[in-house]
Image: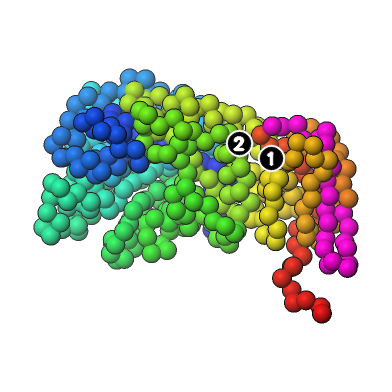
């Protein structure tokens, strides 16, 4: 589909989980709830009337949409997905459907509007997250069994009176939305999921719908949180990933992934044909945590030099042996060898089973030619591609070497029956 073109080329997006839960930072009544700070209302079973009081103090005076999006550009992401409404039911925009929204806080500014405009100014695709089934504030929404009696709920009322009208608001008041990111469909009836899909397309036919609308109705496959598939995947897909151990802001979680970790994941995901959606959880005052910023800016600096090895790449063929020194991405007839963890005194690396002839090799960052040898050993039925790395791999994060091939990469099948 033509509308998937930007998604396939982007490869790297920025997820932003931000809402009232940032005020708590994972702590309620002195107890730390470490897993999913944005789920604290449910984990701590906070009564609706207590949780709603957070809106009386939510005043992120440091929020600057221009700063956020300028940072996103520096980080090298191509799209930004923002939580317009998470499971707590609170809308981070000027919703006319429910007064449980950011306009009824001391802050009183439409975050979705300001972010969408900033993204448009800076060429970032703007996307919105919307929790379509769980809503712990609404009496008929899914998930809150401590304030409301499950047997007395009528989900259809919630769907008609809140979900559809709010989705319409998001798709008719904020310009083109690149993607709407639904979540936790659980056992939502198939007919309602189909109705929601048609509802989205009735307002923006080119808006991509993620896989968590349910029942395979999305435009691409949504992988599990923080999970990367073992093998390449034929169709479009995306992995949502946290930078630390939670999605929303945490007062105590400083366990950030390293820049190398992120680059390794980006290479792994891109090589398998997918996108990486990496999350940050802004503070109650509206700042991107410094730990997140440092990691993502370092990755962005690497992408400025090596972005050709990520953006617009295709699914790579599956090599039959583990690649211990890094990973491989591909675009057309170019193989990008990501050398991340070579032995300290290694002279060369080896890529096994590549049948296609290599025309030349060079360092992506400098253009410097790299020596290599390529040959077939008939007695062992093995294809060898040996690349000199000593003196050529200087990037401590990931040195990218480009192999120009005579055609599309072909890999020798080592699982063919033996010739005994």
Pick the residue in front: 12 or 248.
248
In-image side of 179 versus 99 (left or right): right
- For label 2, the SS is helix
Does the rendering let one see residue 4?
A: no
Coordinates of residue 165 in the picture (x, y in percent):
25, 48
Kindly identify the residue that appears in the image at 28 percent across and 64 percent down. 189
Which corner quadrant holds the N terminus? Answer: bottom right
The answer to whether 41 is drawn above or below residue 27 in the figure is: below
In-image side of 299 versus 72 (left or right): right
Coordinates of residue 154 in the picture (x, y in percent):
15, 58
Kindly identify the residue that appears in the image at 47 percent across and 47 percent down. 226
Tags 2 and 1 in contact by the CB under 8 Å rule? yes
- For label 1, the SS is loop
Coordinates of residue 149 in the picture (x, y in percent):
12, 54
List the residue tagged with mark 1: 340
The answer to whether 218 is drawn above or below residue 61 in the figure is: below
In-image side of 23 versus 116 (left or right): left
Magenta segment, which residues?
374-396
The answer to whether 69 is drawn above or below residue 264 in the figure is: above
Among the two numbered marks 2 and 1 on one chain, the one whose residue lies closer to the N terminus: 2
In this view, the residue farthest toward the bottom is 420
Dividing the picture into quarters, in which one does residue 214 lie?
bottom left
Kindly identify the residue that appears in the image at 38 percent across and 64 percent down. 215
């Amino acid at each position: 589909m033509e509308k998937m073109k930007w998604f396939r080329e982007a490869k790297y997006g920025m997820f932003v989980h931000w809402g009232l839960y940032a005020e708590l930072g994972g702590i309620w009544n002195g107890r730390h709830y470490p897993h999913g700070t944005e789920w604290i209302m449910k984990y701590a079973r906070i009564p609706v009337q207590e949780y709603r009081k957070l809106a009386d103090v939510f005043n992120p005076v440091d929020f600057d949409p221009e700063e956020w999006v300028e940072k996103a550009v520096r980080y090298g992401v191509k799209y930004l997905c923002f939580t317009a409404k998470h499971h707590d039911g609170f809308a981070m925009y000027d919703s006319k459907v429910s007064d449980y929204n950011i306009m009824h806080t001391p802050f009183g500014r439409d975050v979705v509007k300001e972010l969408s405009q900033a993204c448009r100014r800076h060429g970032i695709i703007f996307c919105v997250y919307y929790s379509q089934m769980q809503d712990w504030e609404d009496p008929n929404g899914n998930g809150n069994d401590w304030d409301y009696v499950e047997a007395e709920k009528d989900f259809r009322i919630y769907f008609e009176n809140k979900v559809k009208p709010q989705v319409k608001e998001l798709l008719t008041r904020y310009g083109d939305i690149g993607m709407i990111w639904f979540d936790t469909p659980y056992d939502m009836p198939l007919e309602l999921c189909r109705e929601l899909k048609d509802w989205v397309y009735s307002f923006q036919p080119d808006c991509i719908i993620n896989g968590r609308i349910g029942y395979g109705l999305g435009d691409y496959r949504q992988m599990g949180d923080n999970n990367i598939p073992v093998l390449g995947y034929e169709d479009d897909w995306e992995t949502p990933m946290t930078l630390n151990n939670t999605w929303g802001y945490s007062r105590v979680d400083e366990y950030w992934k390293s820049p190398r970790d992120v680059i390794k994941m980006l290479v792994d995901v891109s090589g398998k044909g997918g996108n990486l959606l990496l999350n940050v959880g802004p503070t109650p005052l509206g700042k991107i945590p410094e730990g997140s910023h440092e990691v993502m800016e370092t990755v962005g600096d690497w992408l400025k030099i090596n972005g050709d090895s990520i953006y617009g790449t295709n699914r790579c063929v599956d090599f039959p042996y583990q690649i211990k020194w890094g990973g491989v991405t591909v675009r057309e007839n170019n193989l990008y060898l990501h050398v991340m963890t070579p032995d300290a005194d290694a002279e060369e690396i080896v890529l096994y089973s590549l049948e296609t002839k290599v025309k030349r090799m060079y360092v992506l960052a400098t253009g410097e030619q790299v020596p290599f040898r390529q040959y077939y050993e008939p007695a062992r039925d093995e294809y060898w591609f040996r690349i000199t790395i000593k003196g050529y791999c200087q990037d401590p994060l990931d040195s990218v070497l480009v192999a120009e091939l005579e055609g599309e990469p072909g890999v020798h099948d080592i699982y063919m029956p033996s010739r005994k």
